Amino acid sequence: MYTSMIQTIAVVASLAAYSVDATATRRSTKKLTQGTTWTLEAWGYEDTSNGYMIDIDLQTKSKDYVKSLVDGGQYVVCYFSAGTAEDWRPDYLDMMEYASKDSRYPGEYWMDITQWEDFKHLIKARMEEAVEKGCHGIEPDNTDAYEYGSDAVPGETKDSLKPYQIDYMRWMANTAHELGLEIAQKNTVDLIPDLIDVMDYAINESCAKFSKNAYCSNYEAFVKQDKAVFGVEYNTNGDCSDAQSEGIMRKYKNSNGSQWMDCKISTN
């Protein structure tokens, strides 16, 4: 019996070591660095480019679809909302138990991030789904509830919600890494100093639109660490001179358009 127990312990230890090694290998063999090209499929508009990274929706895409992308040599980032309950998702009712208020989008409700430790099991389940489907990385969206203060969580302010947001995002990053996934910092540019050490790449919407606040320049921290920065603008003429100088691989969409276009990149 003693010998059998020792053998069992040895097998468990071996499997644990294999799991750790596999996770380390998964993360070390695929990295998104400065200048990485990308295809944006997740957000509902057409993108005919063929980038190295492809951003897809986690819950509407199959394991076979992810495998086809991986087999084709692409790095697959899987999108999900980490800050809202969406009424078209399979786990919507579970998420709604922790929702606080309607968001600015139809069918979406802000999660009460002061309760993130209570609903983190739901977010971890989504990360585990990403692993099971074969995604390399994740894009957790709607992590900016703190910016809306009481409009997101009644009775709270931006300042009171910010520490919860940082703790929640650090937990997501650490959990993703434990699962062998890389993770994007989505928007939340003012949190870059608090999170740059745990985020692997960045995805931004409309930082050039707020250029008077020099939002795009905040990504210098990612650039210095050779971490990819991906960006989109919803209404632009496609001039990418500013994005190129700031290390951002940017796409744009005309205001009435239905297709993402890659910005012009100078070869000079």
Image (spheres, helix red, strand yellow):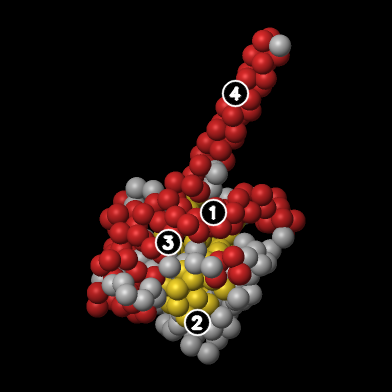
Task: Estimate how packed mark 3 is, as few (under 14), some (14 to 19) or many (20 or more) residues with alpha carbons within 10 Å.
Answer: some
**Residue type of the residue flagged with mark 4:** Ala
The answer for how far apart the CA atoms under marks 4 and 3 are is 35 Å
**Residue type of the residue flagged with mark 1:** His
Foreground of the two, 51 or 136: 136
Using the image, determine if residue 11 lies above or below residue 199.
above
As drawn, the label of residue 32 is none
The answer for how far apart the CA atoms under marks 2 and 3 are is 21 Å
Residue 213 as seen in the image, left or right of residue 201: left
Residue 125 as seen in the image, left or right of residue 166: right
Mark 4 near mark 3, Cβ–Cβ under 8 Å?
no
Per the image, the residue denoted by label 4 is 13
Task: Estimate how packed mark 4 is, as few (under 14), some (14 to 19) or many (20 or more) residues with alpha carbons within 10 Å.
Answer: few
Using the image, determine if residue 243 lies above or below residue 120.
below
**Residue type of the residue flagged with mark 2:** Tyr
Mark 4 and mark 3 lie on one chain; the one further toward the N terminus is 4
**Residue type of the residue flagged with mark 3:** Gln
Under tag 1, what secondary structure? helix
Closer to the eye: label 4 or 3: 3
Residue at x-position 71% and y-position 53%: 67
